[in-house]
Image (cartoon, grey):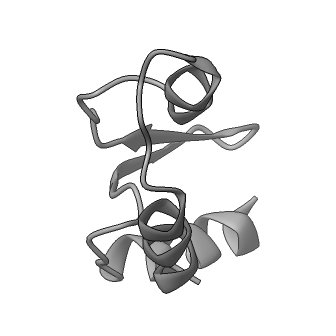
Amino acid sequence: MKQEADILCLLKEQEHKNIIKLEEIVTDGESVSIILENCQGGDLLKLINKKTTKIDIPLVMVNLLSGI
């Protein structure tokens, strides 16, 4: 479990506007729990599935790919 927690600590140090922020890591010896940033705005899949909403797909893809 220590190796997983160490990897998560590296992720906690990273910040990017298009990647959800890792707020806290909690370990108890048997498991590792992560607390993530609360993101407003809803689920991307639900937004894409709405037929009444016009979505700028190229912009969404640029934002998704910039997080990689």
Q: Is residue 56 left or right of residue 15?
A: right
Residue 67 place in picture, x, y as percent: 49, 78
In the image, is residue 30 above or below residue 8?
A: above
Residue 45: horizontal and vertical position, in percent?
62, 30
- Using the image, determine if residue 47 lies above or below residue 22: above
Q: Depth check: 5 or 39 in front? A: 39
Quadrant where the image shows the N terminus: bottom right
What residue sits 33% from the left and 81% below the top? 13
- Name the side, left or right, on which 15 lies relative to 56: left
* Residue in the image at 47% along x and 84% along y: 66
Q: State the residue at coordinates (59%, 84%).
A: 68
For the residue pair 31 and 35, the one nearer the viewer reads as: 35
Instruction: Please determine whether, in this image, residue 51 is positioned above or below residue 14.
Output: above
- Residue 62 percent across, percent down from the top left: 48, 77
* Tag count: 0
Query: Residue at image x 31%, y 77%?
Result: 16
Position in image of residue 56 (x %, y %): 42, 55
Please state if 68 lies on the left or on the right of 19 as rendered. right
Using the rendered view, name the quadrant where residue 4 is placed.
bottom right
Nearer-the-camera pick, 5 or 59: 59
Query: Which of 26 and 23 lies nearest the eye of the viewer?
Result: 23
